Image (cartoon, rainbow, N blue to C red):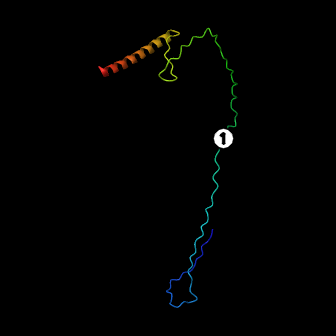
Amino acid sequence: MATIEVIPVTTEVVPAEPTTEQDEVVAVEPVVEDPVEEPPEAKRKPGRPTGSKSKIPGKPRAPRQKRVVVVDAPEEQEEIPEEIERVLPNSHPIPTHGFDDRSVMMLAMLQQQADDRKNRKAALYKSWFS
């Protein structure tokens, strides 16, 4: 770091005659050094620190199971009806037939709810224009 020199300054009244021993006042500009740039801190690696791993080995992973693909004969598959235009994309329509008693009862309940919803909406619209 640079030091600034101290120059004596007199506050005496200068006589009209110049003297050779007068102190000269010289303005010294301070020297500004560039700030030392510190190197940026090294970024930490993401994830778990290396010292935190368990010393006890874990259980071995189970071997992968092969997928078994069952292909039905074409005559056993049901025919898929043509695409129905759906209100919501990727929505599934309510099935029309059941495979057992419980699914038949569930389908009847869902159909009744859909009919009630339609009837309520129609009644609401009629009430606006009657």
Residue 71: give x, y in percent of width and height: 65, 14
The residue sitting at 37% across, 20% down in the picture is 121
Q: Quarter of the image containing the N terminus?
A: bottom right
Q: Is residue 130 placed above or below 75 in the rendered structure?
A: below
Q: Provide the residue designation for mark 1.
A: 52
Residue 64's quadrant in the figure?
Answer: top right
In the image, 43 versus 117, the foreground residue is 117
Residue 113's quadrant in the figure?
Answer: top left
Position of 93 with respect to 33 (left or right) is left
Q: Quarter of the image containing the C terminus?
A: top left
Q: Secondary structure at mark 1?
A: helix
Q: Residues within 10 Å of mark 1 (few under 14, many from 20)?
A: few
Residue sitting at the far left: 130
In the image, 64 versus 67, the foreground residue is 67
Q: Amino acid at mark 1?
A: Ser
Q: Is residue 113 placed above or below 21 in the rendered structure?
A: above
Residue 63: give x, y in percent of width and height: 70, 25
The residue sitting at 42% across, 14% down in the picture is 112
In the image, 21 versus 52, the foreground residue is 21
Q: Is residue 94 placed above or below 3 in the rendered structure?
A: above
